[in-house]
Amino acid sequence: MVKFRFIIFALVTGFLSGCQSVSPPVAFGPTPSARQLEWHETEYYAFICLSSATYRDVEWGYGDMDPDEFQPVNFNPQQWVEVVKAAGMKGMVITAKHHDGFCLWPSKLTDYSVASSSWRNGKGDIVGDLAKEAKRAGLKFGVYLSPWDRHDLRYGSSEYIDYFRGQLTELLTWYGPIFEVWQDGANGGDGYYGGLCEQRKVDNKTYYGWDVTDSLVRELQPMACIFSDGGPDTRWCGNESGYVGDPNWAIMDISGAMPGNANGNSLQNGNPDGNRWVPAEVDVSIRPGWFYHASEDDKVKSLDHLMKIYYESVGRGANLILNAPPTKEGLIHPIDSARLVEFGQALKREFSKPLSKSGIKKVEATNERGGSSKFSARHVLDGKKDTYWATDDSVQQASMTMTLKKPERLYAIRLREPIQLGQRIESFKVEALDGSDEWQTVAEGTTIGPRRILRLPDREALALRVTIGSSRACPLLSEVQLFLPPKE
Ligand code: FUL
């Protein structure tokens, strides 16, 4: 009888403890907003730089081009969109107005725009046509509006700020959903300024009144991310060469930061002690310059260079905005478009052989939060961003091991943290086990964040171990995806 009672007791308590819910980890540090989470998904998109600089063969238009010089006679937004799609990109951002002040849309607030060109009898609208075509093709659409304006006489006065906000209002209300608003930090000085041709300096800390402008963006396009050196939604990566730092924290201290001024934060690395989620965007051109110059036709970046850029931007958890500047005629040059199509194919091929869940025999971890299956390491295989492996709060170093069904050749690995709960991991390593008993380190890194993609040395492995060396709070991983070598 005693034995029987004990069995009942054991069954009931065992059952109850199995049902006991283990509390999920609480969010750590700053976390992304809904608009930022959506932006992270956009991952890789095009920059389209077109302005008077294209027609004057310079990098910064002075602001004195006669609007009639603007003749993109073969402008075909469909061609741009097709190239962008074939490159595997998910969106595009156009220089609606660059530093030269010339507007690619028929702004009602200035005559310095496409409406004053004889191109299409003043009825042309690059921004509008592109927005429509992007929407049709399922691409996100964003706008770059240069705060610095080398054409306008009002630049430097408070009237100019009203003008700038008025232009932003047109762009954010005329052309449908906008996913990103690009605020450039450049404030060069000299310009045409209504014919005065002089130097103008503004104090960019006080002149633009960014708080008011940012509230306007929020009001008109609540899902648009604002990009600048100071966020508030996404930050410049600190260089125009195509990489973000390692570590790359999607966090910075935005107090006092603004376009042109990161206020002491490292743009390349972010700032883990910061107060806001502000992930990095890597902006780089497929050519040396941002605008089309025939002299650079033989300097279009190689496929290998673009792949390196991809691994050092997207692969380090940043977004990548890759510039493809149209020619004077309004087309993406055949050398650039061929390279972009090739790059799109190379990216598809690169990740064409993910090791499926069925190729994995077992997954074990040194610690699983509360011993609960809800936080077991198996969740790194389920392809979901809201399920994850978690450890107990007291554990900041841990390993998870995947044993494969048969030895597989390694190629690449992608890891993700569930960033809705903040960014935590500071260092990790990946080891592989082949026939022998010795684990070999095949990759190492610092931060992971929304994604970390690393190439692995070409060798066979029967098991793979991911060790979190240090983490600012209990580590969480929502994905460990292994890729096998693509077909030759
Ligand atoms: C820079 C600008 O000065 C370049 O002309 C270009 O627009 C690039 C994207 O940002 O700061």
Image (tube, rainbow, N blue to C red):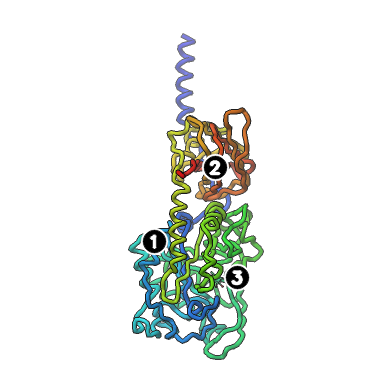
Residue 15, located in which quarter of the rendered image?
A: top left
Can residue 222 be seen in this snapshot? no
| Horizontal side, residue 337 vs residue 304: left or right | left
Kind of residue at disc 1: Leu
Q: Residue at x 35, y 64 (%)?
A: 135
Can residue 47 be seen in this snapshot? yes
Residue contact between numbered discs 3 and 2, judged by CB atoms under 8 Å: no
Residue 201 in the image: above or below residue 453:
below
Q: Nearer the viewer, mark 3 or mark 1?
A: 1
Residue on which disc 2 sits = 476
Q: Nearer the viewer, mark 2 or mark 1?
A: 1
Q: In this view of the protein, which residue sits in the foreground, 103 or 484?
A: 484
Q: Residue at x 60, y 44 (%)?
A: 473
Q: Residue at x 60, y 49 (%)?
A: 447
Image x and y of residue 294, in percent? 50, 73
Residue on which disc 3 sits = 260
Q: In this view of the protein, which residue sits in the foreground, 295 or 310?
A: 295
SS of the residue under disc 2: strand
Q: Name the N-terminal-most of marks 3 and 2.
A: 3
SS of the residue under disc 1: loop
SS of the residue under disc 3: loop
Image x and y of residue 156, in percent? 57, 83
| Horizontal side, residue 239 vs residue 114: left or right | right
Q: Name the N-terminal-most of marks 2 and 1.
A: 1
Badge 1: how crowded within 10 Å, few (<14), some, or many (20+)? Answer: many
Residue on which disc 1 sits = 139
Kind of residue at disc 3: Gly
